[in-house]
């Protein structure tokens, strides 16, 4: 049994990661923000309220040894560049980048006590490809990719740090883009694999990067994207 921490583990990809890790017999410490704690009950999982947008927050509940750390909070706010508001860009950056920095800083001493610790962050294919109206998304996730490589260099060989860059994935975060059969079909057809991603697709790669099977991988941005970044059909 290993100890894993999943920030943003009550919904979407984070929830799928928590479920898979717990089902494999690991102990998981997961955070939630919007959900009521009474609705969250999973064997081997300890849930804690955390709002990374607050100036101060408490992670004293972290276990002494953390084998893996996942930061899952995200946002998909699509706007023409001319309509971007600095305060909204800052809010997204705070949620997706500064939140990762602050929580990971607190977790590093616990990760260093593990034998083969691993960190997984999340980017998006929009950083590599460039899509209309994705400036606000790409600003934050581009920073995550830079952070991933920088931390991988700084903490090698002790702590591995990798990121996953999904294409659109069927989670509550993306619901407004997949809210009808027509929208689902249109998004599926953009991908060579002819479907959108599911949270489980990303969770399985996350768990692979957390465990020792991937022990020679660090500093990587891995596309789990139905082929959209590499293939045209």
Image: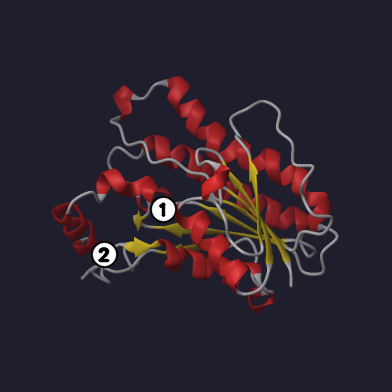
Across and down, in percent, residue 120 comes to 61, 58
| Mark number, residue 191 | 2
Contact check, label 2 and label 1, Cβ < 8 Å: no
Q: Which residue was labeled with disc 1?
A: 128
Residue 229 shows in the view:
no
Please tell me in which quadrant of the rendered image residue 106 appears.
top right
> Which quadrant does the N terminus fall into?
bottom right
Numbered tag placed on residue 114 in the rendering: none
> In this rendering, would 219 be left or right of 79?
right
Between residues 7 and 120, which one lies in front from this camera angle?
A: 7
**Residue 47: image x %, image y %?**
64, 50
Q: Nearer the viewer, residue 78 or 54?
A: 54
* Along the viewing direction, whichever of 26 and 191 lies nearer the viewer: 26
- Circle 1 sits in a helix, a strand or a loop, which is it? helix
Residue furthest toward the left?
182
**Sequence order check: which comes first, mark 2 or mark 1?**
1
Residue at 76% across, 59% down:
66
């Amino acid at each position: 049994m290993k100890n894993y921490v999943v920030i943003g583990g009550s919904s979407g990809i984070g929830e799928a990661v928590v479920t898979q890790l717990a089902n494999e017999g690991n102990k998981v410490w997961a955070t939630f923000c919007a959900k009521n704690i009474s609705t969250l009950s999973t064997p081997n999982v300890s849930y804690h309220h955390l709002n990374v947008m607050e100036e101060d927050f408490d992670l004293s509940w972290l276990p002494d040894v953390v084998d893996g750390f996942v930061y899952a909070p995200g946002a998909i706010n699509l706007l023409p560049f001319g309509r971007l508001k600095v305060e909204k860009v800052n809010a997204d950056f705070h949620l997706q980048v500064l939140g990762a920095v602050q929580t990971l800083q607190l977790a590093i001493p616990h990760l260093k006590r593990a034998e083969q610790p691993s960190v997984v962050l999340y980017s998006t294919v929009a950083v590599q490809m460039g899509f209309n109206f994705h400036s606000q998304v790409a600003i934050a996730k581009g920073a995550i990719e830079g952070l991933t490589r920088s931390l991988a260099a700084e903490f090698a060989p002790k702590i591995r740090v990798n990121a996953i860059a999904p294409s659109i994935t069927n989670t509550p975060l993306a619901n407004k883009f997949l809210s009808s059969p027509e929208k689902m079909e249109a998004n599926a057809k953009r991908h060579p694999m002819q479907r959108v991603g599911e949270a489980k697709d990303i969770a399985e790669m996350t768990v692979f990067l957390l465990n020792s099977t991937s022990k020679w991988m660090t500093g990587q941005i891995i596309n789990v994207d139905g082929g959209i970044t590499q293939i045209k059909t």
